[in-house]
Amino acid sequence: MERQPDNRSDIRDFLASRRAKITPEQVELPTSGRRRVPGLRREEVAVLAGVSTEWYTRLEKGHISGVSEEVLGAVAHALRLDEDERTYLFDLARTARPHRRTPSRRKEVAVPPEVQWMLDSMTLSSAFVRNGRQDIIAANPLARALHAPVFDSTTTGENGRANLARYIFLDPSAHDFFVDWESAATATAALLRAEAGREPHDRALRELIGELSTLSAGFRTEWASHDVRIRHDGSKRLRHPEVGELDLTYRSLDLPLPNRAVHDLTVYTAEPGTTAEDRLKLLTSWAATRSQEQRAEDSSRT
């Protein structure tokens, strides 16, 4: 039987960080005297969750194995966890439970040709597929053009894949490419935090987190916040070296693949009639030209 990863520190820090964000006034608890801790006390969370202070204290120390889903749900409600945070807490509990058999590991899965055809058919939107480690494993020509600084970065991994997390935290040019770099950094660390809770046996993921923690003070700060993000959509401003700033909307959708692999299909679009749409169309033409040149170059080699 494979040894279970010890995630007690993750459980402790996550619950303590969520508790610190809630004030007694928010949950209509009486306050009196000076408080030595930010947010709620452990005994106050215990009251809200309907459990004993001793029991909740033990839980916050990381002893989560064997806790029922009903009790975990009560704690999540007491701490006002959002949907993503609740999912993360349940993932931590699942990981802490002993397994009779060795937990299955995710395998690297190639993107089926049909998925690449789908990406290439989306000519007016930037579309790419990434895994939970933030590797871009497939993209259409416009995505490669729009995210050219990412694909051209020296932070590309040994597998030849562009990695959004490495680019954001290790490439100085990311501060120019992402107009709101802080938001991009926060979201990326939160996505990795959720993935770590979901897939604790992913050695490549652990190595990536270790690398970023060693080399990036910004990542260490974001990682220590224990923020979690699973759903990923909204607006983003990019400063492209060829066409300037673009205000875009993006949305990520789950793309299940064989062998338990679940990747994100992420699509960037521009509002019709805006300057961003004009610039995205310009990038579309540029991407088509580059694609034709690449095909011509490949043909000349054969």
Image (cartoon, rainbow, N blue to C red):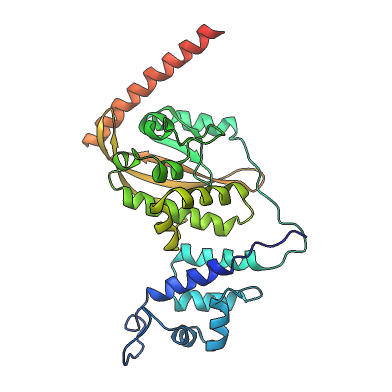
Does residue 282 lie above or below 264 as drawn? Answer: above
Image spot of residue 227 (x, y percent)? 43, 62
Q: Quadrant of residue 149?
A: top left
Image spot of residue 177 (x, y percent)? 31, 39
Q: Quadrant of the C terminus?
A: top right
- The reply to whether residue 220 is visible in this rendering is yes
| Residue 50 located left or right of residue 272 | right
Does residue 79 lie above or below 7 as drawn? Answer: below
For image coordinates 53% across by 77% down, the residue present is 60
| Residue 200 located left or right of residue 299 | right
Image spot of residue 112 (x, y percent)? 60, 33
> How many marks on residues?
0
For image coordinates 60% across by 68% down, the residue present is 93
Image spot of residue 52 (x, y percent)? 54, 89
- The reply to whether residue 227 is visible in this rendering is no
Does residue 283 lie above or below 258 as drawn? Answer: above
Q: Quadrant of the N terminus?
A: bottom right
Which of 75/226 is in front?
A: 226
Q: Residue furthest front?
A: 214
